[in-house]
Every structure is written in C-alpha cells, then in structure tokens.
Amino acid sequence: MADPIGTNEPAQRPLTLEQLAQLQQQFVDARSWQRFHTPRNLATALIVEAAELLEHFQWADRDEPVTAGSELWLKLCDEVADVFIYLLSLSDTLGMDLAREVERKLHINEARWPINAADNAEWQERNHP
C-alpha cells in the first residue's frame, strides 16, 4: 500500500478501515506520540474536534445548503476527517475492532428504531417524551 501521508494526496483507491487505522498508527509512531494517546486524551481530543465541526454551523441558517466543493464543504471535510482520525486512534488504543462495533451497534439500532417508527405517533410518544 502506498503511503499517502506526507504527500498530501489520498491513495488512488478507497482504503479499508484497517488500512486507515494503520496509516494513523504510522503517523503517531513516527512522532512518538503513543505516550499522549491515552483513552482520556483521545476522547477529549475527539470532542474538541467534534466541537470544531459544529462551530461551522453555529450561526448558519437552518436551510443553508452545503454544496460539495464549496469552501464550507472543504472545511467540513477536514473536521469530519479529524473526528474520524481520533475515533480510529481511540478505538485502537482501547483494543476495539471499530468495524465490528459499528456493525453490532447498527443491529441494536435496527431493533430499537423500526422502519417508519417516526411516522407512528404512539411510538414517538413512548420513545421521545
């Protein structure tokens, strides 16, 4: 796998979750940052980056569209990537298989939130008081 880190260029093909995690770990290892990557520090950094993502919407009109390729969209891409990078690092530090945990949680959500549930007033009242 070609290492796009340092080139500022993405790989020619989409990378797997595992490959992205490996690239992130290489980045951390090259800088000897492992000692800073405690679960608490990574969770804190994740929230800070999520707040930076939200900041772009702070004073936006609710109906303001985000157009692919626009300046706002490019900034959002950077923030979403930062959130994801910290999530990868946190899950790796905790020894989690992120793909497996996402799949597991999606199955839980599927059972908890049935199709068309939002259209059912009784269900809404029971689950969103």
Image (cartoon, rainbow, N blue to C red):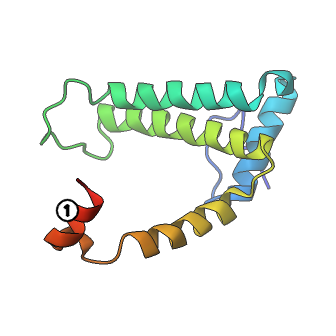
Residue 73 in the figure: left or right of residue 58: right
Q: Is residue 7 above or below residue 105?
A: above
Q: Residues within 10 Å of mark 1 (few under 14, many from 20)?
A: few
Q: Is residue 95 above or below residue 29?
A: below
Q: Nearer the viewer, residue 69 or 32?
A: 32
Q: Nearer the viewer, residue 50 or 101?
A: 101
Residue 59 in the figure: left or right of residue 51: left
Task: Residue 116 in the image: state x and y as whole percent.
Answer: 24, 76
Residue at left 43%, top 25%? 52
Q: Is residue 23 above or below residue 120?
A: above
Residue 76 in the figure: left or right of residue 47: left
In this rendering, does residue 3 appear at all? no
Residue at left 31%, top 32%? 72
Task: Residue 73 in the image: state x and y as whole percent.
Answer: 34, 38
Q: Quadrant of residue 126?
A: bottom left
Q: Quadrant of the N terminus?
A: bottom right
- The amino acid at mark 1 is Glu
Element type at mark 1: helix
Q: Quadrant of residue 98?
A: bottom right
In this rendering, does residue 121 appear at all? yes
Residue at left 61%, top 46%? 10
Q: Nearer the viewer, residue 119 or 10?
A: 119
Task: Residue 80 in the image: state x and y as whole percent.
Answer: 48, 40
Q: Nearer the viewer, residue 41 or 127?
A: 127
Q: Which residue is mark 1?
A: 125
Task: Residue 40 in the image: state x and y as whole percent.
Answer: 69, 27
